[in-house]
Image: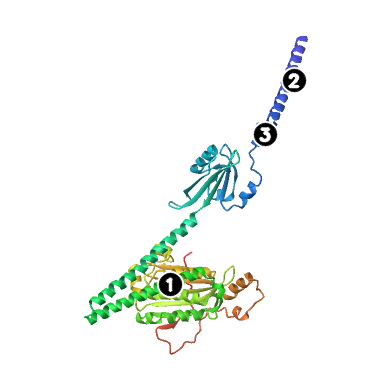
Amino acid sequence: MNVNAAVAAASAIAGLCTGVIAVLAFRWSEREQARPTRASMRPDDAVVLPPGVDTVLSVLSSSAVVLDETDAVVKASSAAYALGLVRGGHLAVDRMLQMARETRRDGEIRQIELDLPRRGAGRGEGLAVSARVAPLGSRLVLLLVEDLTEARRIEAVRRDFVANVSHELKTPVGALSLLSEAVMDASDDPEAVIRFAGRMQHEATRLTSLVQEIIDLSRVQNDDPLDDAEPVEVDDLVAEAVDRCRHPANVKQITMATGGAPDLHIWGNRGQLAAALGNLVENAVNYSPVRTRVGIAGRRIAAPGGDLIEISVTDQGIGLSEKDRDRVFERFYRVDPARSRQTGGTGLGLSIVKHVAASHGGEVTVWSAEGQGSTFTLRLPEAGIARDRALAAAGAADFHDPGLDSGPDSDSADPDTDPDTDSLYETFPDHIPAPEVLP
């Protein structure tokens, strides 16, 4: 009995000792975890940004990344994450990481331009960036990355524009030079002189058109259309565009059909708007076969930000392929270069239309199918809405012209027609459907 009691007592004592040891070990572990590290005990070794650096980085337009001595990211701007420079708390671009290590080693500032793949983009699409690495204190390295993609694109467009202008100008100038020599050599042949003189006149007209369209393109890019803004009636723009193309349409026996809702107004520069619509109608006539139809119609459509005015120009011409639809608004781009030279086209007309639409707060779109024709649509804010926005921005919101806000919402066309109008000119019926527009 005494033996059993002794065993029980010994077991109890052993269990008590085991429990005490376990508690002591747990408390010791907690104290070790809570004990400050050498870095925290030495403030100069703590991985913190120098005073004021965080504020400066937050206002920089460049993407900023700060790395510590282990290449871990201490601070990164949202733009750095958006460009895909930082992933999982580490710098994801090996070349930049290598530059950071070299700068940390020798303290020299380094800069490089790189082409990076764009996140989520297809092959061939990338980002052009300029990376600059500099030491930040004794342990940190600062990486600044500037996105040069848009600047590179603009520079490429500028180079292409200069090259295309040079080529387009040299072509008619060279032709005029050769034709003048031919006229001199054929001075004793009246028929040859007349033929060469006609060609010279054609080339001179083409050169004049090219220079004028370059001037027009420069003007719409640099001028603010709201400086000389006024309410412009859509019917007046359509009439001016039709009158501009009346002769070539008659020559090709093309029927010009106009219609749509009356009393539509656009707020903007009359000259620019007339040039834009005129270019669309002129293209429709030039690229349409003989004895076909070109239609111009305007209507009012509802939109979340206010009503829009839509002016559509539809033809029954050669149409556009998918590749051409994507590039048709580029400067000097021609769907059919040989045909453009025959018609005197310069490849700048649709580019001017695009800039005019954008500067007036609208857009131009195209629907087309090869062999079926095309529909170009100008979509611009209605006069009252665009005017109110412009005047509100100028601090003149108390101005109001009730004549612009009134007007029927009906889409019916005016039934009255002028009996003296050329038989080639008609009026659209009321039930013409809206043109299909690509998204």
Residue drawn 59% across the image and 68% down it: 305
User: Which residue is under mark 3?
Assistant: 42
Residue drawn 61% across the image and 78% down it: 405
Q: Are marks 2 and 1 in contact (CB under 8 Å)?
A: no
Residue 161, image x and y in percent? 42, 64
Secondary structure beneath disc 2? helix
> Which numbered disc, 3 or 1, marks the residue that appears first in the sequence?
3
* Three-letter amino acid code at the position of disc 2: Leu
Residue 134, image x and y in percent? 55, 44
Q: Residues within 10 Å of mark 2 (few under 14, many from 20)?
A: few
Which mark identifies residue 213? 1
Horizontal side, residue 218 vs residue 178: left or right: right
Residue 153 visible from this viewpoint = yes
Q: Is residue 274 above or below residue 26?
A: below
Residue 120 visible from this viewpoint = no
Residue 359, image x and y in percent? 53, 69
Q: CA distance from mark 3 to mark 2?
A: 42 Å
> Which numbered disc, 3 or 2, marks the residue that appears first in the sequence?
2
> Which numbered disc, 2 or 1, marks the residue that appears first in the sequence?
2
Q: Is label 2 or label 1 in front? A: 1
Q: CA distance from mark 3 to mark 1?
A: 70 Å
User: Which residue is under mark 2?
Assistant: 16
* Three-letter amino acid code at the position of disc 3: Arg
Residue 77, image x and y in percent? 59, 49
